[in-house]
């Protein structure tokens, strides 16, 4: 009888040790399968930059920059919100693309960082200051909630144009939505 009880205790101890070792493994070791949205968009893999001959660019950044540049064009043609971009549009109409290039870079950096890129930093204004005409003279008025909805619709259209899969667009939309209260100030 003593032998049976002893064996049972050993069995329970063995199972407990195995289970706790497994749970320890799960939480202590890095999950190599966990991808950021940036990784899903191509991540740090270097590819040829189609708009800069002889240069390479991270695939994730290229995907984001392509969507950003398309989105700027979609927004420029969107009568619901293009009035906010009056300064930029006037510059471009006059053949001055410096503001467009600066916006493209800052938006690309912003979304690279927001999706989990490690090799870029965002150096522009914070979202509240960038969208307040008092702190950004390039913002022609304060945006309202429906302007924000139009902005998201335009980014989604640009992402579809660039063949970004719907599941990724949904995640991008969710990130953008977290910034609504900072951007909407009307
Ligand atoms: C979450 C959504 C948005 C994000 C992440 C975003 C991001 C940015 C960034 C990074 C800049 C550049 C700031 C700088 O250079 O310091 C910018 C500028 C600007 N944004 Fe937004 N924005 C958003 C929504 C909107 C909306 C809804 C509007 C208007 C309807 C808007 C209008 C503008 C304008 C007019 C500028 C200045 C453009 C220029 O340089 O001429 N943004 N935004």
Image (cartoon, rainbow, N blue to C red):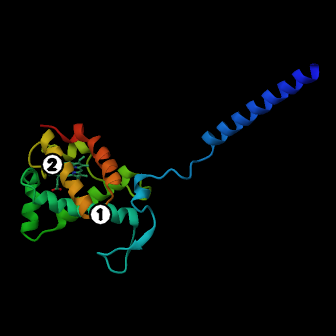
Neighbours of disc 2 within 10 Å: few (<14), some (14-19), many (20+): some
- Closer to us: 43 or 52: 43
Percent x, y of residue 38 = 40, 56
Q: Is residue 140 visible?
A: yes
Label 1 beta carbon within 8 A of ligand 1:
no
Q: Is 118 displayed left or right of 6 in the figure?
A: left
Percent x, y of residue 63 = 33, 63
Mark carried by residue 163: 1
Neighbours of disc 1 within 10 Å: few (<14), some (14-19), many (20+): few
Q: Can residue 122 be seen in this view?
A: no
Task: Point out the image quarter for the N terminus.
Answer: top right
Mark carried by residue 150: 2
Relative height, residue 152 to residue 61 (above, below) = above
Say which residue appears at 84% left-offset and 25% top-offset. 8
Say which residue appears at 15% left-offset and 39% top-offset. 145
Percent x, y of residue 9 = 83, 24
Q: Is 144 displayed left or right of 58 in the figure?
A: left
């Amino acid at each position: 009888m003593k032998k049976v009880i002893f064996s049972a205790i050993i069995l329970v101890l063995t199972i407990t040790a195995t289970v706790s070792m497994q749970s320890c493994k799960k939480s202590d070791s890095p999950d190599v399968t966990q991808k950021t949205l940036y990784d899903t968009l191509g991540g740090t893999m270097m590819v040829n930059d189609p708009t800069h001959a002889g240069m390479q660019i991270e695939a994730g950044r290229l995907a984001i920059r392509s969507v950003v540049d398309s989105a700027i064009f979609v927004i420029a043609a969107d009568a619901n919100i293009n009035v906010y971009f009056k300064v930029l549009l006037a510059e471009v109409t006059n053949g001055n693309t410096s503001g467009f290039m600066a916006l493209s870079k800052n938006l690309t950096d912003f979304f690279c960082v927001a999706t989990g890129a490690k090799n870029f930093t965002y150096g522009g204004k914070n979202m509240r200051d960038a969208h307040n005409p008092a702190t950004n003279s390039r913002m022609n008025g304060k945006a309202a909630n429906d302007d924000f909805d139009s902005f998201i619709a335009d980014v989604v259209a640009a992402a579809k144009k660039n063949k970004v899969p719907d599941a990724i667009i949904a995640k991008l939309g969710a990130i953008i939505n977290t910034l609504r209260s900072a951007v909407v100030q009307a």
